[in-house]
Amino acid sequence: MQRKIDTVLFDLDGTLLNTYELIQQSFLATFTYFGYDHITKEDCIPFIGPTLEESFSSVAPKHKVDEMIAYYRKFNVEKHDELVTEFDGVYETVKTLHKEGFKLGVVSTKVRYTVLKGLDKIDLLQYFPVIITLDEVEHAKPHPEPLHKAMEFFQSKPEQTIMIGDSHHDIEGAKHAGTFSAGVAWSIKGREFIEKLEPDYILDNMKDLLPILGVKEYAEN
């Protein structure tokens, strides 16, 4: 593909940032507090990717959802730095793409505050001039609106853009927006799940993205 692609959009949770433990603990704490003790850690896996409103609405009555979201976010922020790490190869890959002149953005279904907090935790905030969160859109992924907003800022075309993610929201969002897509095999839902989504590429490590984009190796310091 070489330099045909010049714009790279990343999902945050489960793609750049290993927030799996944080997310599952946040859901468990919330469900326990509101009396849904039967929900297990494994039951929370399908909630990774959708918006909080979608996730809680699938379990609780509508009038409880806002309250549950507020509790979740409070717990999530308090435990954030304790439980969050980056995935292998992420920092070096993003830094290299930045040095090579690629347009880099983050497109997340989280609210802006927590996205910025996560990127700052792994020292990546400096590399992303465009960050599209739930606060900037009417429709979250897999609707194409968030990807379109990022591309508008960069003045990029869909055929010049690739979306990297760990869930169907990312891969379907890319398809709806007309961009290329890459699924990450380290998704908590497993490589087989990612394969069934039929992304254009599957990454076993974030550094696998470099040859796809025509970059030979990590940039020096």
Image (spheres, rainbow, N blue to C red):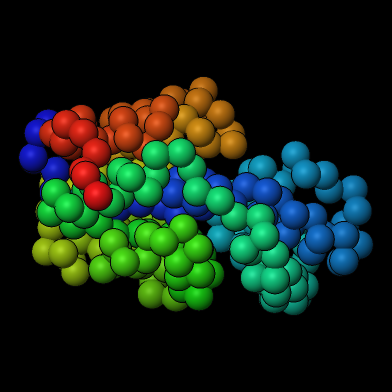
Q: Quick one: which residue is furthest to the left in this view?
A: 3
84 left or right of 71? left
- Residue 141 to residue 196: above or below: below
- Residue 162 to residue 67: above or below: above
Q: In percent of the image, x 20 and y 61: which residue is there?
A: 151
* Location of residue 70 (image quadrant): bottom right
* Count of labels in the image: 0
Q: Nearer the viewer, residue 193 or 91?
A: 91
Q: In the rendering, at what x and y percent does residue 143 appear? A: 38, 56
82 left or right of 35? left
Q: In percent of the image, x 45 and y 45: which residue is there?
A: 15
- Residue 58 to residue 69: above or below: above
Q: In percent of the image, x 82 and y 44: which residue is there?
A: 40
Residue 138 appears in the picture as rendered:
no
Q: In the rendering, at what x and y percent does residue 97 appear? A: 22, 48
Q: In percent of the image, x 70 and y 64: which residue is there?
A: 79
Q: Nearer the viewer, residue 90 or 61?
A: 90
Residue 135 appears in the picture as rendered:
yes
32 left or right of 79? right
Q: In the rendering, at what x and y percent does residue 200 appear? A: 29, 30
- Residue 161 to residue 54: above or below: above
Q: Quick one: which residue is furthest to the front in this view?
A: 221
Where is the N terminus found, in terms of image quarters? Answer: top left
Q: In the rendering, at what x and y percent does residue 58 appear? A: 70, 55
162 left or right of 169? left
* Location of residue 124 (image quadrant): bottom left
